Amino acid sequence: MAPRILIVDDNSDCRSIFARYLDRLGYETSEAENSAQAIQKAVAERPDLILTDLQLSDMDAVRTAILKQDPLAGKIPIIVLTGMADTRCRRQALKTGIARYLLKPISLSQLSAEIEIFAGGAGACCPT
């Protein structure tokens, strides 16, 4: 079974670009356009990884909501992909327990290398 990745971004073009790229690499993807959808899909689908934009919502609130709703979904690694290079934002996000804080623009090859760390290769057995 291919690793599953939930892509969360309020920009439909960004979601689409990442989904098409990851689908071509053999990952299964689903999409959410806001934190409410992200929480619902994380609990229902239990993806191997969540890839999300930071400006979409407060990551601490998202993480806390997932943990309160479902302890298993709360363990899903989250990679933040953002244009916010501010050190304070980075520190706050990392305190919430996210796995990585990556800056846009990012090359697709760099993104896939980061995803490989947490979701494994397409078709690989994923650590949870």
Image (cartoon, rainbow, N blue to C red):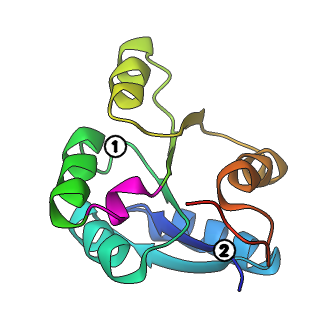
Q: Position of residue 96 (x, y in %)?
A: 32, 34
* Residue sticking out furthest to the bottom: 1
User: Relative to the observer, which residue lies in front, 2 or 104?
Assistant: 2
User: Relative to the observer, which residue lies in front, 84 or 97?
Assistant: 97
Q: Position of residue 45 (x, y in %)?
A: 41, 81
Number of labels in the image equals 2
Q: Which mark, residue 64?
A: none
Of discs 1 and 2, which sits in the foreground? 2
**Label 2 neighbourhood size at 10 Å, few (<14), some (14-19), many (20+)?**
many
17 in the magenta segment: no
- The secondary structure type at the circle numbered 1 is loop
User: Which corner quadrant of the image does residue 120 belong to?
Assistant: bottom right
Side of 19 where 45 appears, left or right: left
What residue lies at 33% left-to-right and 57% top-to-bottom?
Answer: 74
Residue 65 vs 101, above or below: the answer is below
The quarter of the image holding the N terminus is bottom right
Q: Position of residue 13 (x, y in %)?
A: 54, 68
Which span of residues is magenta-colored?
Answer: 71-76
Q: Look at label 2 and name its amino acid.
A: Pro
Residue 22 vs 114, above or below: the answer is below
Q: Look at label 1 and name its amino acid.
A: Gln
User: Which corner quadrant of the image does residue 38 belong to?
Assistant: bottom left
Residue 123 vs 85, above or below: the answer is below
Side of 73 where 39 appears, left or right: left
What residue lies at 39% left-to-right and 43% top-to-bottom?
Answer: 54
Q: Label 1, label 2: how many angstroms apart (C-alpha)? A: 25 Å
- Per the image, the residue denoted by label 2 is 3
Q: Earlier in the sequence, mark 1 or mark 2?
A: 2
- Per the image, the residue denoted by label 1 is 55
What residue lies at 79% left-to-right and 72% top-to-bottom?
Answer: 124
